[in-house]
Image (tube, rainbow, N blue to C red):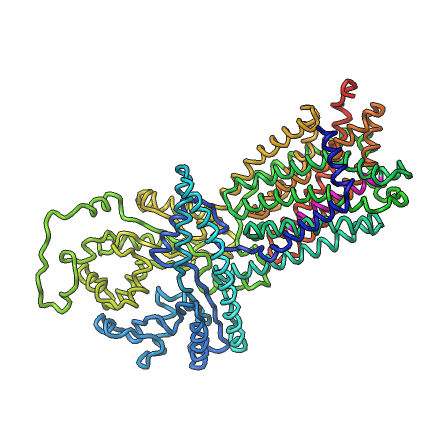
Amino acid sequence: MKIRFLSLYDRLVLGKPLATLLLVLLITGFFGWFVPDLKIDISPDSLVLENDEALRYYYSIRARYGSDDYLILTYTPKRGLFEADTLNDLRKLRDKLAAIERIESVVSILDVPLVQSPPMSLEELEQHVRTLEDSDTNLALAERELRDSPLYRDRLVGASGDTTGMQLVFHRDAKYEHLRKSRDALREKELETKLTPAEAEELERFTIEFKRYRAELMEQEEADIARIRAIMDQFRDRAELHLGGKPMVVADMVDFVRHDIKVFGIGVIAVLALLLIIAFRQPRWVILSLLTALATSVVTMGFLGLAEWRLTVVSSNFLALLLIFVLSLTIHLIVRYRELHVRNPDGEQLYLVREMVRSKFIPCFYMVLTTMVAFGSLVVSGIRPVIDFGWIMGISLTSALVLSFTLFPAALMLLKPGKPHKPRDLTTAVTSLFPPMIEHHGNLVIGTAVLAVIFGAIGMSKLTVENRFIDHFHKSTEIYQGMYLMDRKLGGTIPMDVVIDAPVAFLQEAKKPPEEEVDKADSEEPWDDADFEGEAGITGTSYWFNVFKIDDVNAIQVYLDGIPETGKVLSLSTTLEVLKQINGGELPDNFALSLIYKKLPDEVKESLIAPYLSPDGNQLRFEVRVYESDVSLKRQALLEKMRRYLIGELRLSPDQVHLSGMLVLYNNMLQSLFRSQILTLGAVFLAILIMFIFLFHSVKLALIALVPNLVAVPLVLGLMGWLNIPLNFMTITIAAISIGIGVDDTIHYVHRFGEEVVVDWDYQAAVRRSHGSIGRAMYYTTVTITIGFSILILSKFVPTIYFGILTALAMMIALVANFTVLPLLLERLKPYGKKSR
């Protein structure tokens, strides 16, 4: 089989290099046509768990109480906030923003209802809703109301009175919601039962349409945010302005991804080209390696564009990884070719290239396969960007292997061998340091490795996924500055909802049909035309909206407001405080509450009641904002503490309490990612062990080959634990990548050691010869990979910087382990027997 494959390869690739290059050129050109179709998706929904029950609940709460896809613009004037010039400036800013087509509304201190400026009765409020812009508004009283009102304090006006916030709400897109709901409904059905062919086809259609339409919406939002910033620039000479909110974070992260793709691509190519020049000092190796890398990049990006796959912040570094991996493959080929040329200075080009391919294809094939297995562990994460990253790297590695063994050798066939070049002394000097260390200090090497594993294991026990989203960004970015300002002056940044249902027994009773219909009699009271159910109206049918439950509502409000990590908390409790003010400082009775509920103007009801109480009055919503910049914030602990208190202390049943919002979804994603990736490490090692057994035909040898990565991976993860570097959706992939790339050197070393040891069965001599041959290729590739990953420090996204530094460190540790622990075990355990010769 192997001979037939080599014969076919000789005939098709090496025998017809021009035809091979022409075919590669045509394939590259075809996929290159689709490179512009490669899009970026940084939507918030892409960073949560698919099929998460909390995600479905989140959508239902958004549908009932309104979307949290809004922008917050903070405005800190250089003069007093309530001075006439400042208010006029604020008015101009609001009007310019409201004129943007896709903005549905702009809520500012100029627009919200004022009930104490001066005080208004319910009858007056029914006739007219006063705002700051009305001529009869008392400006001094309005300033006090906006600063002290439980509705507006730390929401629209900061406690210090020098900063205000504007809420910019985008139009709700009906088509987007229809496509998402249709797709999700079929996805849920697919989890429970097998879809019919028609349903499967429909799911694929909805998925594609949703991706396309979401990409269009993101482009529109990006353009809208650019317009908003252009408008903000017109007012920066009179005030300090910052923009925040999910749409802005998404737009800025899209810019970060574009920046990273461009910088990583150019930076990696430039740095690695320089390394190739320094290492090999021949233009042919630089040009052929870069051509192979560029062709592989074009083919992969074109395929992703054709398949309509989206790049995310997680997969934005795939191009850098791909370039690094292609160049590591070609470096192994170059080093082997030069070795063969030194040994056979008069050898023909066909012989040299054929022998290069023959000796390197099997280790390179398994090297790619094991790396794909490691990246494959990301597919079970349940998070779409991480899943896609795993698949993208699988496609990238396949392209890299195919083109490295077609384009590179075919192009090499068109060149003459030239003069042989002996290895450079510097590389030999580095690799030759290790054999004497192994021979004379073997026990020290083993002891150090064991201590490293113990150190790493203890550190891994300290790993956590608790991290602040604000720390993902540099302090110079508007995302960081806006979040920090809103935390300090406007009551917190990250939204979450605490939703409390009525007891199940009450809801079941409410569903029963009434035994008799109560006639509605006319009355002479002025508000008797209200459609009340019974004498008390909504207070008679609602579980929460009545005087008997006010103490319970207030108890929940007081608890949530008193948690150190929470900022502004709004609920029915704050609404009732405002109603007390309208009612002369006393809480209305049930009948009056029903009258107020019925007679309140819609715009007031939309502000005071609708965001916090379901239409039937049987569900409460507490709108909580959390301080994202709080260094003590632990999301999982916070959520557990809330649920424990509400159920244990306030005696609510578990099925009444629901925690929702982006904070909950983000926390679920991190917790699931931690469990899935840490627990799948064992499965990855097992899969690689099985492949090693097939490759080396020896269980003993396969176990030995696994050891270097059992040193490198725990040590890097443990170091993260000791340094309190949290795991996130970027750094969690370090383990998979470290295993995948780390085993590459192991495979090449064991493969070469097997060839060297059978020469004279002198294990120490085999170690020296292996270090002097394949060791140089390992050194070159690891230096290349390390410097390539170091390019990621140029990212604008902090997790990517950590990812680059830690992965580079893992590669260096793996190299040292492969240069020391691996040959020492091979020498002492002697897995090769003379019978296998």
Q: Position of residue 67 (x, y in %)?
A: 39, 58
Which image quadrant for residue 194?
A: top left
Closer-to-camera residue (341/668): 341
- Location of the N terminus (image quadrant): top right
Q: Percent from the top left, x then y, of residue 604?
A: 29, 67
Determine whether 599 is above or below 689 in the image. Answer: below
Residue located at (51% from left, 47% from top) = 384
Q: Is residue 722 visible?
A: no
User: What secondary structure is the magenta-colored segment mainly?
Assistant: helix
Q: Quadrant of residue 473?
A: bottom right
On the question of residue 685 being in view, the answer is yes
Please state if 608 lies on the left or on the right of 667 as rendered: left
Image quadrant holding the C terminus, namely top right
Residue closest to the eye, 124 or 807: 807
Q: Which residues are magenta?
A: 319-338
Q: Nearer the viewer, residue 755 or 793?
A: 755
Q: Residue furthest top?
A: 835
798 w.r.t. 423: above or below: below
| 133 on left or right of 516 | right
Q: Is residue 43 above or below residue 786?
A: below
